Image: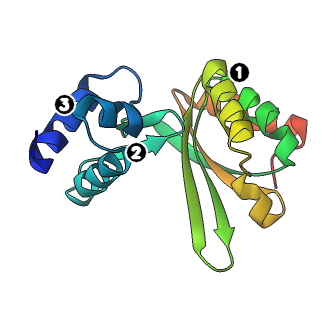
């Protein structure tokens, strides 16, 4: 059986080589430990400065920041899929969602959605878990960090969100 430090080292190595995120359950199965043990390992790695993020699809190293900008949006939960599709159709990556909560301050959810398949997986998981959008806490108002390769992509994302009535200005 591996020590905690050995397991953490192998988790880092696996994530460094992985083309896709890896779930805590998959790591737990691989190492013969519980999912919660892996969650703890990830927390310890983060505390040591390892730039890991949790996405709806599992853990991964935080991607190198390309160009990013923040937009403010407002829509209903039923319109979330359309909003995500507009971002990815125009070359953007939906990095995260943020809301300003009156009790907890800023709440952030890591998304990293760049493709229609990732959008569909996110929405299916939301439905399966009977989850709620963070924006439901704030009357639909929320922020997104958008990653993009060039300024034209970001302008196209903003224009598409504006045309759909989602951009809060």
- Please report the residue visible at 37 percent of the width from the left and 40 percent of the height from the top: 62
Estimate how packed mark 1 is, as few (under 14), some (14 to 19) or many (20 or more) residues with alpha carbons within 10 Å. Answer: some
Nearer the observer: mark 3 or 1; the answer is 3
Q: Is residue 129 above or below residue 143?
A: above
Return the residue at label 2.
53
Q: Is residue 167 above or below residue 23?
A: below
Q: In the shown orientation, is residue 156 left or right of residue 32?
A: right
Marks 1 and 2, how far apart at CA:
24 Å
Query: Residue 89's mark?
Result: 1
User: Where's residue 103, x and y in %?
Assistant: 64, 80
Snapshot quadrant of residue 16: top left
Q: SS of the residue at dot 3?
A: helix
Return the residue at label 3.
13
Q: Quadrant of the N terminus?
A: top left
Nearer the observer: mark 1 or 2; the answer is 2
Is residue 113 visible to the viewer in this orientation of the structure?
yes
């Amino acid at each position: 059986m591996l020590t905690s430090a050995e397991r953490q080292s192998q988790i880092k190595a696996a994530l460094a080589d992985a083309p896709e995120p890896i779930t805590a359950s998959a790591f737990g199965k691989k190492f013969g430990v519980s999912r919660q043990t892996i969650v703890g390992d990830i927390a310890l790695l983060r505390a040591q400065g390892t730039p890991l993020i949790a996405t709806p699809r599992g853990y991964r190293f935080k991607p190198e920041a390309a160009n990013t900008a923040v937009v403010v949006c407002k829509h209903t939960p039923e319109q979330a899929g359309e909003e995500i599709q507009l971002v990815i159709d125009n070359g953007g990556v939906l990095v995260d969602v943020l809301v300003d909560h009156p009790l907890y301050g800023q709440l952030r959810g890591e998304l990293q959605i760049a493709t229609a398949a990732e959008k569909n997986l996110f929405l299916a998981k939301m439905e399966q878990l009977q989850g709620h959008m963070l924006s439901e806490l704030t009357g639909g108002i929320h922020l997104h960090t958008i990653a993009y390769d060039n300024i034209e992509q970001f302008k196209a994302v903003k224009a598409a969100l504006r045309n759909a009535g989602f951009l809060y200005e």
